Amino acid sequence: MASPADHPPQGHTAIGSRAGGDGPTIAPAPPLRRVIRSFGYAAEGLAVMLRTQPNFLVHTAAAVVALALGAVLRLSPVEFAIVVLTVALVLVVECLNTALESVCDLVSPGMHPLVKRAKDISAAAVLIGAIGSVLIAILVFGPHLVGMLK
């Protein structure tokens, strides 16, 4: 039995398929208005996180401190990239945790053991990211701070 992926909608050709045997085709770029609207939705999500999630504010404040400290200590480009990636990871995991919690609350307003498990695991992911970020901060900033004390 053929899957829907084998038969793209009329007028569309899947990336990499051959339309009339001419070679691979690429889907047209989305209209600029749609791309701009997508950025608006992302900005709205970021604003919601900043307004409603105290832990996101804590992580954002820590990120600002880490990035400022990196600039003051004149971290190498690789060290600074590690800090930026770590900051991004923690903030992304916090957003995903909040999104998962929102969906769990929607589908199961009451207490359910599987919803609790999902929320606990999601919170554990944030904790793991936060602990990892502290360890990375020690590894990256530590030598620079110790060097300043000598």
Image: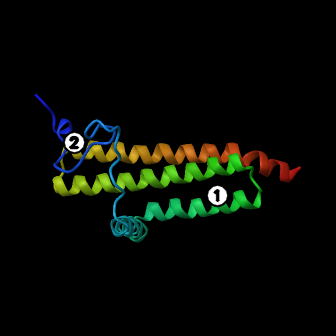
Which of 96/1 is in front?
1
Between tags 2 and 1, which lies in front?
Answer: 1
**Going by the image, does 59 lie left or right of 71?**
left
Q: Is residue 58 above or below residue 140?
A: below
> What residue is shown at x 34% (from left), y 37% (from top)?
23
Q: Which mark is residue 11?
A: none
Instruction: List the residue tagged with mark 1.
Output: 66
**Going by the image, does 26 lie left or right of 68?**
left
Kind of residue indicated by mark 2: Leu
* Mark 1 neighbour density, 10 Å: few (under 14) some (14–19) many (20 or more): some
- Which residue occupies the extreme right position in the image? 150
Kind of residue indicated by mark 1: Ala
Q: Position of residue 47 (x, y in %)?
A: 41, 70
From mark 2 to mark 1, how far is it between C-alphas? 36 Å
- Which residue occupies the extreme top position in the image? 1
Which of 9/126 is in front?
9
Mark 1: which secondary structure? helix
> What residue is shown at x 43% (from left), y 65% (from top)?
54
Question: The N terminus lies in which quarter of the figure?
Answer: top left
Instruction: List the residue tagged with mark 2.
Output: 114
**Going by the image, does 11 lie left or right of 60?**
left
Q: Is residue 72 above or below residue 133?
A: below
